[in-house]
Amino acid sequence: MTPQAAFPPSAPSLQPHRAPLWRWLLLALVLVVLDQGIKLWIVQNYAWGHSSAITSFFNFVRVHNTGAAFSFLAGHDGWQRWFFVGIAAIASAFLIWQLRSHGQHKLFALALTLILGGAIGNAIDRLAYGYVVDYLDFHWAGRHFPAFNLADMAITAGVIGMLLVEWQRWREERRQQASSAHGAGQGPER
């Protein structure tokens, strides 16, 4: 019998530490508020297409993206607005469910929270304006990377975090397999 099986599930010393869901949701809310605050400032201070050089390789700019990443589906007649809002709503519900189930896994929960905050931030733009407001413009030697925003950075960081979690899980699984194989290959000494 495992030590956990010997105690009732309510035994506090054996329960994994679970960060309350509200902490992750509060972090997502902070991200959404920051994202929306910056976007509101951009909308109030920049006309569409105008920019300000901050450094030799970075500008603040006001760009509207009716599509997804890299303006995917931007050239369509408007159906994509509701499509992306629907995807964001479904993804947000799934992410909250995952946070509720796995909130004790800090890196995984942080990654989910970043994706959640970013998805909600961009969905708010789609509902309010019909497009996402992008404002960060990096460029070099006359070539511009597609403009993006804080919500996009959060989603990207969250995906990187999820990949890191999966890589760590894979490494641990491989380590355990190697340890089992090594232990199984040893017979009793004669």
Image: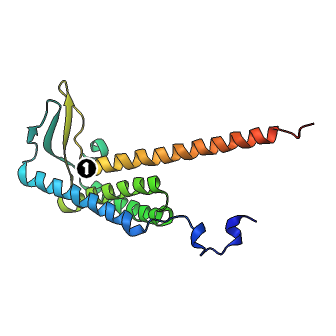
Q: Is residue 138 visible?
A: yes
Task: Report helix, strand or loop for mark 1.
Answer: helix
Q: Quadrant of residue 56?
A: top left
- Percent x, y of residue 179: 71, 41
Disc 1: which residue: 150
Q: Place residue 147 in its image quadrant.
A: top left
Which residue is at 22% across, 57% downward?
34
Nearer to the camera, 153 or 12: 12
Image coords of residue 164 (percent x, y): 47, 44
Residue drawn 72% across and 64% down?
2
Which amino acid lies under the numbered mark 1 shown in the image of this protein? Leu
Left or right placement of residue 76 versus residue 47 in this view: right
Left or right of 102? Residue 116 is left
Please tell me in which quadrant of the rendered image residue 86 appears.
bottom left
How crowded pointer 1 is (Cα within 10 Å; few <14, some 14-19, many 20+) is rated as many
Foreground residue, 160 or 7? 7
Residue at the top extreme, as displayed:
141
Give how far across and how far down residue 43 sits, in percent.
11, 53
Where is residue 92 shown, x and y percent of the image? 38, 62
Residue sitting at the far right: 190
In-front residue for pair 101/8 = 8
The N terminus lies in which quarter of the figure? bottom right
Q: Vertically, is 37 above or below 160?
A: below
Q: Is residue 130 visible?
A: no
Q: Residue at x 32, y 61 (%)?
A: 27
Q: How is the image coloured?
A: rainbow
**Location of the C terminus (image quadrant):** top right
